Image (cartoon, grey):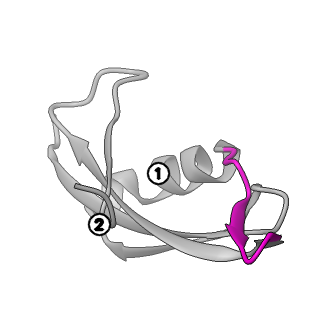
Amino acid sequence: MKHQGTVIADAWIDEAGKVQCVKITRSIPVYYAVVTASRLRWQFQPAMLEGRTIAVVQSAAVLRRPFRAGEDHVHPLNEH
């Protein structure tokens, strides 16, 4: 059976840009573990505030068509 839909995942990103924690806020159950594992591997440039690196939380929508290995369409929710 093929599944499709949107998974929304929040990532807690530390001062070094590494994802420390993932919270799924909307999911298709079959994708929960896959999206969590994927987000934990992401690396970001550290966020800056007043010249210092800071930890942040980023929400992203992961859009899934019928599953094909390695195909993610990710859209950060705070960017247009």
Magenta-colored stretch includes residue 5: no
Residue 28 lies in what quarter of the image?
bottom left
**Which residue shows up at 78% across the image and 68% down it?**
14
The percent coordinates of residue 68 (x first, y second) are 30, 21
Count of picture labels: 2
Assign the N terminus to one quadrant of the image. top left
Q: Magenta region, mostly helix, strand or loop? A: loop
| Range drawn in magenta | 43-52
Looking at the image, which is closer to me, 60 or 37? 60
Residue 3 lies in what quarter of the image?
top left
Q: What residue did someone put label 1 on?
A: 35
| Left or right, 80 with reference to 15 | left
Give above or below for 62 relative to 10. above
| Left or right, 53 with reference to 13 | right
Q: Secondary structure at mark 1?
A: helix
Q: What residue did someone put label 2 on?
A: 27
The percent coordinates of residue 9 (x first, y second) are 42, 66
| Left or right, 15 with reference to 69 | right
Give above or below for 30 relative to 23. above
Q: Contact, CB < 8 Å: mark 2 with mark 1?
A: yes
**Which residue shows up at 33% across the image and 66% down it?**
78
Assign the C terminus to one quadrant of the image. bottom left
**Which residue shows up at 34% across the image and 33% down it?**
72
**Which residue shows up at 56% across the image and 44% down it?**
38
Q: CA distance from mark 2 to mark 1?
A: 9 Å
Magenta-colored stretch includes residue 47: yes
Give above or below for 74 relative to 27. above
Nearer-N-terminus badge (2/1): 2
The type of residue carrying mark 2 is: Ser
The type of residue carrying mark 1 is: Val
| Res 26 label | none
Residue 21 lies in what quarter of the image?
bottom right
